[in-house]
Image (cartoon, helix red, strand yellow):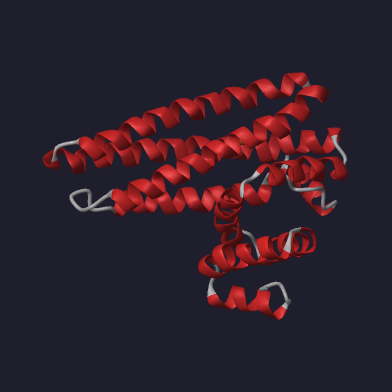
Amino acid sequence: MTSTDLLALSAARRWDIYGPVHKGLRRAHGAMAARLGSADYAADLRPLLADLRAHLEIAGQHLAHEEDHIHAALAARAPDAVATLQDQHEHHRARFAALQAAIARVEHGAAADRPGLGRVLYLEFSAFVAEDLLHMLHEETTTWPLLCALFSDEELMTIEQAIVASLSPDETIATMRMMLPAMNPEERTGLLTGMKAGAPPQAYAAVIEHAARPTLPRAEFAELERLGLAA
Ligand SMILES: [Fe+2]
């Protein structure tokens, strides 16, 4: 995959099944890495560790969604393409187990040991982020072009809609909190326009109040209001 090929797919406005959610994951990974780096490990760590566990749960759910919907579809048309993706996902799951162990050591460690255990947790998380950044790069530069070659935009949208439909209301809000501030204005407007047209009004209002309003800078939320998308 060359940058020219990616440019051609982007110029053709092919359905970007990975881009927006991966932007959200990258932003959330970076924010969590920064928090783990600047935390005072002698202080009350419960809010940070709860947020870290929630973040890892979303990251794990993302893998499962890709497997259940994207890999399943891909396996039917390009069986050889799934093995590498699956290996990378299994590697992530091993890293999640190591991270859960590192979290537990910070929680239960003696006070004198906690700064050192916090450093180990921070480094373990940074390793996960490094691996996931490369994995998502592989998906967007190798798997996405393959998906575009094998599936129409309508088929890719149907796969994505099946993922969206599988989310619980809480998962939808958590995912939107991650994605909306990470997207560019055009992507955000496109997503919310489609959601407003297709979702029940109460569900759309919940996304605006619990995901868009608390996470977007004031000027970007004002732009949604100007476009009639803020309610
Ligand atoms: Fe993946």
| Residue at image location 73% in from the left, 39% down from the top | 2
Residue at 20% x, 39% y is 116
- Across and down, in percent, residue 153 comes to 85, 45
Does 105 sit left or right of 212 as displayed? left
Pinpoint residue 35: horizontal percent, then vertical percent: 35, 53
What residue is at 46 percent from the left and 40 percent from the top?
56
Image position, residue 22 (x, y; %): 61, 47
What is the quadrant of residue 79 in the picture? Answer: top right
Q: Is residue 115 above or below residue 231?
A: above
Q: Quadrant of the C terminus?
A: bottom right
In the picture, residue 86 is in which quadrant? Answer: top right
Quick check: can you spot residue 177? yes
Residue 210: x and y in percent read 55, 64
- The image quadrant that residue 148 belongs to is top right
Query: Depth check: 193 or 167 in front?
Result: 167
Q: Nearer the viewer, residue 136 or 70?
A: 70
